Every structure is written in structure tokens, then in C-alpha cells.
Image (cartoon, rainbow, N blue to C red):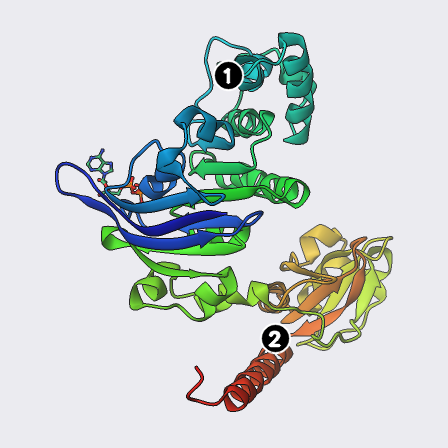
Amino acid sequence: MIRFDGVTKQFPDGTTAVDRLDLEIVEGAFTVFVGPSGCGKTTSMRMINRMIAPSSGRIEVDGRDVASVDAVALRRGIGYVIQSAGLLPHRTVVDNVATVPVLTGTSRRQARREAMAVLERVGLDASLATRYPAQLSGGQQQRVGVARALAADPPILLMDEPFSAVDPVVREDLQNEMLRLQADLEKTIVFVTHDIDEAVRLGDRIAVFGTGGVLQQYDTPDRVLSSPATDFVASFVGRDRGYRGLSFRDGSSVPLHPLSTTRAEAATEVRLEPSEWVLVVDEADRPRGWMDVTGLEGVRAGHSIDESTAAGGSLFPEGGDLRQALDAAISSPSGIGVAVRRDGSVLGGIDATEVLAVLAAQRGTEASERSRAFTESGPAAG
Ligand SMILES: Nc1ncnc2c1ncn2[C@@H]1O[C@H](COP(=O)(O)OP(=O)(O)OP(=O)(O)O)[C@@H](O)[C@H]1O
């Protein structure tokens, strides 16, 4: 466990970067420090591995004050990943990853063998191992940075904006990889980002920092979105926080309705009223697009299915959440969302108003549970 106890950091020029921080970071949890630029996230993180010393207060790692522990020994148990990956340019990928184990006494051969296994773990092809960092893409360099931090198998991993320099698609890949790794490794991870979406996606717990290094809220992503503790948090998480919060709600009780579908080869046989739509599916029953009367006339006139259908919206995967359900319904040209099985075949149709009814029902249940807890514990107990 990592514990901040009344920690303040004031730099010599008078800037208060972190202001009386109290925080307990749970072992094995993915904790994200989030907030706008300059609010003390990086400073707080760097006080954990003693790269920065607090002006007052105390930081404990596993019950020991970090100020009293040898800094080198402390850092051996704490991996550190930064935005630029921080790789050594004149060493190959495999030797970058093997650096720390070699420094701590593992033979070069053994360290390289282990480095190859870690590279595979972070999703890097073995053929990249002999390249130099400059011969890799930004996303690949970040993976090497993560591999290097993991090579010494530290129980704690600090990650400072590790994915902020890569494009959004690669970034999403890296985030998924991180979630997959963490499910496996269960390290104590502290991750700094200024991107609330990234925080919500990755974190078990989120610490929202505000101006002047004051901690605003420390909570689950769901609670940060649904019950911001301060106006600062509310404005930081943004106007569409309610919609984002839907991704923490189970969509399994959204009603599914039979859908009118047709195979592409039979599309010319379909009968449609002017306001009706039919979902065209392929031979495996997977959606290809929506067709209305105009599209049907097109197919009958010899146009292709792709030319005659409107691309479907996003799909609602079996087992998905309420955000995916609502998005599927409102992004569909027909107004009906399409639910699909794991193999991509059509499962049924979704109505947006029914998704909202499920949300209202879930909220109603939560409200009555809260009021029961309040009555049982008595107003004075809280
Ligand atoms: N060595 C330093 N000397 C003086 N002020 C500093 C120093 N390092 C950081 N600061 C200031 O402390 C405050 C917090 O900085 P910090 O880097 O922790 O913020 P951050 O939330 O991580 O921001 P960013 O996302 O931009 O990195 C800022 O006002 C910054 O300018």
C-alpha cells in the first residue's frame, strides 16, 4: 500500500505544487491521478519514488516512510514509465529491456531471455528485439518502455502520461493492452493523465487534482462521473459525463425485439412501407446495412447492396453496457439499435426509449437502497 499523509510540496520559488495530500493507494489497484496541467499530478507521483522530496508530510510504501529507505533499493521495487518512453537510443530493444536486471546482477544471457518473454507479454513481435528505438513507431516505443519497467518485476508501477504522445487509435490499443496486462499481473499501478476518458477507462480508483495541487475527489470512475464532489470536478469531467457514466451500467436487461431482416440475395423480394426499414444481413446473419424504400428501388434497378443501404450505426454487443445500447439505438439510421452475438450475428433490436427506461429503473432501485440504508443506520449515524 502507498500512503500520503498530509503531504505538501512547495518549490523554492514559492509554487505550491501539492497541497496537504492525504491518499491511500490500495495494493493491486489501478489508480489514476487526473486533472488539468500544472495541478501537481507528476509531483505527487515522483514523491513516491523519491525523485522529489516533500516539504512536509510523509509518504509510506508498505508501511515504511520512503524518506528513511535507501532510494536505490526503493526504486528497485518501483517501475517507472514516462511519456517519451525514455529508451537508451544506442541499445537494441532487447538490451533496453534487460538493462535493469543486468545492473542488479542477472547474467546478460539470462536477462535477454527474460526480456524476450516480457516483450511478448506487452504485444511486441520478437523480430523487433534487435532494432534500435529510433526504428520503432511511437506506440511500439511505449510498449518497450512498459516492458522495460516490467522486466525487474516490481510490485509497483508508476506511469506518467505514458500514452499521450501517440495517436488515438494506437492509444486505445495500448490502453487495452494495459488492462489485459493488469488483469494478469495485479501490480499496484499509479498512472498520471490529463485525459478523463483515459482515467475512466483504466482506473479502479481515480484521484482528481485541482488548481494549486488540491485533491478534489478520490473515488471510483463511476462515482466521479455520477457524483462529482466539487464544481471543479463537475466541470473537469465535462457536460457529457452522464452519458459516459452509462458505460458503468449493465445493459443485460435492455429488451430485445425481433428485427425485420433479409439476406442480400433476397433483397429485391422485400415489401416495405414508406417509413419502414429492413436490415440486410450476410450469409452468417451479420448486419450489412439498413434499407428503406428508396434503397429497395435502387436494388430493384440493379444497384449493389452497398450502394442501396445506409451503413448501420454502432452495434450493441451481447453483454454490453447501457452506453453501448443507447449509442446503438441513436446512431442507427432506422432508429432501431442492433444487438449482436459474440460471433457478430443479429440477436435483436433495441429501442432508445427502453434503454432510458432501464436506466430510470436502475436509478430507482439505487435510490430506494440508499434511503433504506439511511433509515436503518438512522440520520444521526451518518
Ligand atoms: N522544479 C520546479 N520548480 C518550480 N515549480 C515547479 C517545479 N516542478 C513543477 N513545478 C510547478 O508545480 C506545479 C505542479 O506541477 P506538476 O508537474 O506536478 O503538474 P502536473 O499536474 O503533473 O502537470 P502536467 O500535466 O502539465 O505535467 C506547476 O505549477 C509547476 O509549474
Quarter of the figure with residue 105: top right
Foreground residue among 353 and 367: 367
Q: Is disc 2 placed on a helix, strand or loop?
A: helix
Foreground residue among 5 and 30: 5
Which residue is depicted at the point 42% across and 49% down? 3
In the rendered image, residue 42, in percent from the top left (x then y), is placed at 34, 40
Which residue is depicted at the point 51% across and 86% down? 377
Whether the residue under disc 1 has CB within 8 Å of ligand 1: no
| 250, above or below 124, in the image | below
The mark found on residue 7 in the picture is none
Question: Mark 1 or 2, which is nearer the eye?
Answer: 1
Would you call the spot at circle 1 few (<14 residues within 10 Å), some (14-19), or many (20 or more)?
many
Residue 178 visible to the viewer? yes
Residue, disc 1: 133
Which residue is depicted at the point 51% across and 37% down? 157
Residue 35 visible to the viewer? no
Name the quadrant of the C terminus.
bottom left
In the rendered image, residue 76, in percent from the top left (x then y), is placed at 50, 27
In the rendered image, residue 248, in percent from the top left (x then y), is placed at 58, 64
In the rendered image, residue 327, in percent from the top left (x then y), is placed at 58, 64
Residue, disc 2: 352
Confirm or deny contact between disc 1 and disc 2 (CB under 8 A): no
Quarter of the figure with residue 9: top left
Nearer-N-terminus badge (1/2): 1
Total numbered labels? 2
Q: Amino acid at mark 2?
A: Ala
Would you call the spot at circle 2 few (<14 residues within 10 Å), some (14-19), or many (20 or more)?
some
Q: Amino acid at mark 1?
A: Pro
Foreground residue among 43 and 39: 43
Q: CA distance from mark 1 to mark 2?
A: 48 Å
